[in-house]
Amino acid sequence: MPLRTTTRTGDQALVREINLSLIMNHLLGNSSLSRASLAEVTGLNKSTVSSLVQELIVNDKVNIIAGFGLTPLAFRKQLHQG
Protein backbone atom coordinates (compact mmCIF):
# COMPACT_ATOMS: atom_id res chain seq x y z
CA MET A 1 0.00 0.00 0.00
CA PRO A 2 1.47 3.44 -0.94
CA LEU A 3 2.25 5.94 1.81
CA ARG A 4 -0.11 8.88 2.14
CA THR A 5 1.39 12.32 2.01
CA THR A 6 0.14 15.42 3.76
CA THR A 7 0.65 17.60 0.70
CA ARG A 8 -2.44 19.28 -0.68
CA THR A 9 -3.34 18.41 -4.21
CA GLY A 10 -4.86 20.76 -6.77
CA ASP A 11 -8.44 20.17 -5.69
CA GLN A 12 -11.20 22.62 -6.52
CA ALA A 13 -11.07 24.38 -3.15
CA LEU A 14 -7.35 25.02 -3.46
CA VAL A 15 -7.69 26.31 -7.02
CA ARG A 16 -10.51 28.63 -5.88
CA GLU A 17 -8.35 29.98 -3.02
CA ILE A 18 -5.47 30.60 -5.42
CA ASN A 19 -7.74 32.38 -7.91
CA LEU A 20 -9.32 34.53 -5.18
CA SER A 21 -5.86 35.50 -3.99
CA LEU A 22 -4.81 36.30 -7.55
CA ILE A 23 -7.80 38.64 -8.02
CA MET A 24 -7.26 40.38 -4.67
CA ASN A 25 -3.55 40.88 -5.39
CA HIS A 26 -4.36 42.54 -8.71
CA LEU A 27 -7.01 44.76 -7.09
CA LEU A 28 -4.67 45.77 -4.29
CA GLY A 29 -1.91 46.54 -6.79
CA ASN A 30 -4.12 48.52 -9.16
CA SER A 31 -6.70 50.03 -6.77
CA SER A 32 -9.54 49.50 -9.26
CA LEU A 33 -10.21 47.23 -12.21
CA SER A 34 -13.22 46.02 -14.15
CA ARG A 35 -14.14 42.34 -14.25
CA ALA A 36 -13.08 42.25 -17.91
CA SER A 37 -9.68 43.72 -17.02
CA LEU A 38 -9.27 41.21 -14.21
CA ALA A 39 -10.02 38.37 -16.61
CA GLU A 40 -7.45 39.72 -19.05
CA VAL A 41 -4.62 40.26 -16.55
CA THR A 42 -5.20 37.02 -14.61
CA GLY A 43 -5.85 34.76 -17.58
CA LEU A 44 -9.05 33.49 -15.93
CA ASN A 45 -12.23 33.31 -17.98
CA LYS A 46 -14.86 36.01 -17.47
CA SER A 47 -17.43 33.74 -15.83
CA THR A 48 -14.85 32.54 -13.28
CA VAL A 49 -13.86 36.13 -12.51
CA SER A 50 -17.52 37.17 -12.13
CA SER A 51 -18.20 34.29 -9.74
CA LEU A 52 -15.12 34.99 -7.65
CA VAL A 53 -15.77 38.75 -7.57
CA GLN A 54 -19.35 38.12 -6.44
CA GLU A 55 -17.97 36.01 -3.58
CA LEU A 56 -15.58 38.82 -2.63
CA ILE A 57 -18.42 41.38 -2.70
CA VAL A 58 -20.66 39.19 -0.52
CA ASN A 59 -17.80 38.73 1.95
CA ASP A 60 -17.19 42.51 1.98
CA LYS A 61 -13.68 42.18 0.56
CA VAL A 62 -14.30 44.36 -2.51
CA ASN A 63 -16.82 46.99 -3.48
CA ILE A 64 -18.07 48.53 -6.70
CA ILE A 65 -17.66 52.30 -6.75
CA ALA A 66 -19.12 54.29 -9.64
CA GLY A 67 -16.31 55.70 -11.73
CA PHE A 68 -13.72 53.44 -10.08
CA GLY A 69 -14.89 49.90 -10.87
CA LEU A 70 -14.03 47.10 -8.44
CA THR A 71 -12.01 48.26 -5.48
CA PRO A 72 -10.59 46.43 -2.47
CA LEU A 73 -12.20 47.34 0.85
CA ALA A 74 -9.03 49.09 2.03
CA PHE A 75 -9.18 51.45 -0.98
CA ARG A 76 -12.84 52.18 -0.28
CA LYS A 77 -11.98 53.15 3.31
CA GLN A 78 -9.23 55.49 2.05
CA LEU A 79 -11.71 57.24 -0.24
CA HIS A 80 -14.11 57.83 2.64
CA GLN A 81 -11.36 59.11 4.95
CA GLY A 82 -9.64 61.36 2.40
Image (cartoon, helix red, strand yellow):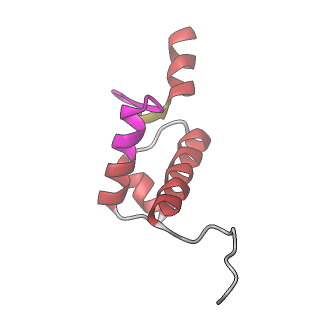
Location of residue 46 by image quarter: bottom left
Of the pair 47 and 31, the residue shown nearer to us: 47
Q: Which residues are magenta?
A: 53-67
Residue at 35% x, 58% y is: 48
Q: Position of residue 56 (x, y in %)?
A: 42, 39
Q: Is residue 38 above or below residue 33?
A: below
Q: Is residue 20 above or below residue 78?
A: below
Which quadrant is home to the N terminus?
Answer: bottom right
Does 63 lie within the magenta span? Answer: yes
Q: Position of residue 4 (x, y in %)?
A: 67, 77
Residue at 41% x, 53% y is: 37
Of the pair 15 and 1, the residue shown nearer to us: 1
Q: Position of residue 62 (x, y in %)?
A: 45, 33
Location of residue 82 by image quarter: top right
Q: Is residue 81 above or below residue 63?
A: above
Q: Residue furthest top?
A: 81
Left or right of 81 in this view: 56: left
Q: Position of residue 9 (x, y in %)?
A: 58, 71
Residue at 38% x, 34% y is: 57
